Image (cartoon, grey):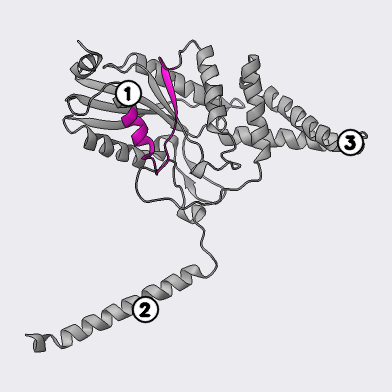
Amino acid sequence: MSAEDVATSDKIVTVRIIIGRTNPPHSGHIKLMKAAIDAAKGSPGPIKCALLLLGNGPGGQRTNEDPIDHQTKSSFIRIKLMNKGYTDNVDFVIQEMKTTEQGGPSQNILDFLLASRINPNSYDGSIDIIQHTGNKPGKASKSRRVVPSDSEKHEGLRSIIKSRIKSIYIHSPSVECRQESVDAEPIYGETPMSATKVREKAVSCYQEATDLIDGGEAAAAADPAALAAMKLADGFECWKETFDFYSGNPEALRLSKIMYDSIIEHKDNKYKPVKRPSKGDPSFVVTSKSRLEPGKAGSRRKHTRKRILRNKKTLRRNRNNRKHRHTRR
């Protein structure tokens, strides 16, 4: 019996996935991934590993919210998971989340199913896609925009994934895409861990190191490059003391330092909108159109004026048509 026959003989295939920006990865992310991997090992069907999809920021931009590139994040996560006893490409697979132009997360999952020899032309069993999320609740942001909870954040995306996979696996009687929550890791012993808090602490540590060094007597005489390196080094030590997670073997420590330096380098870089095509899945969560696509001054008034004039023209044409309807008969 071939590997494909083994896969398609099962009447249910379960795919455990993680979707996240992980900027930077923290202990809560690893806890979530560990839960997905452990669940995948006991899942029915031939797929026994979890699919970890890491975003790379809108348009691949390095900003204050997405300062770390995919390669650095994936290497760091791989080390942390291997230290937990998991095997890369056996217990878990890390992929960069595909962009909208490439088909979005649906394409990642479809490729993963095909690589697992789940043939859409012959497979006639059910497909159950389970996204593991934290149970961090939603809240109002500083801009008074309500930020959805982790479980709500990708509801629309899960619906798109379900529709896309169902359209490919036409012989499958059931395709589901749902989520399972995992308790969030606490930070400072109380509030849920978040990448935002980790980045904020990195900047705070850097500012403390900067104030301390600039206030010293030797600061004025020091070489600027050496001074900048000293600030980064001292800030990193402060950050590492706060989050012991970023310590470890030499390679983990090296990657932690790269991530810290990236956070500081891009701490003032704001997101600049990029034009996105309409086809494909969203590769990241669009939380506010006004925030991502700000208009120029007066543009709303101009567009409203055009719409009013267009509506008036339509009303006038309809009125004239009614008036002369009897002549056309």
Specify few, some or many for label 1: CA neighbours under 10 Å numbering under 14, 14-19, or 20 or more.
Answer: few
Q: For residue 104: magenta?
A: yes
> In the image, which residues are magenta?
89-111
- Indicate the secondary structure of the residue bearing disc 1: helix
The quarter of the rendered structure image containing the N terminus is top left
Is residue 201 at all visible to an observer of this figure?
no
- Residue 154 lies left or right of residue 247; in this view the side is left
Residue that carries the numbered disc 1 in the rendered image: 115
The correct choice, above or below, for 200 with respect to 233 in the image is: below
Q: Nearer the viewer, mark 2 or mark 1?
A: 1
How many numbered marks are there? 3
- Residue 56 lies left or right of residue 5; in this view the side is right
**In the drawing, what numbered circle is on residue 316?**
none
Cα–Cα gap, marks 3 and 2: 65 Å
Specify few, some or many for label 2: CA neighbours under 10 Å numbering under 14, 14-19, or 20 or more.
Answer: few
Is residue 56 at all visible to an observer of this figure?
yes
Residue type at tag 1: Ala
| Residue most extreme to the left | 329
**In the drawing, what numbered circle is on residue 309?**
2
Residue that carries the numbered disc 3 in the rendered image: 219
Q: Residue 90: x percent and y percent? A: 40, 14
Question: Measuring 18% from the left and 83% from the top, which residue is drawn there?
Answer: 321
- Indicate the secondary structure of the residue bearing disc 2: helix
Cα–Cα gap, marks 2 and 1: 55 Å
The correct choice, above or below, for 275 with respect to 297 in the image is: above
Specify few, some or many for label 3: CA neighbours under 10 Å numbering under 14, 14-19, or 20 or more.
Answer: few
Question: Measuring 38% from the left and 39% from the top, which residue is drawn there?
Answer: 104
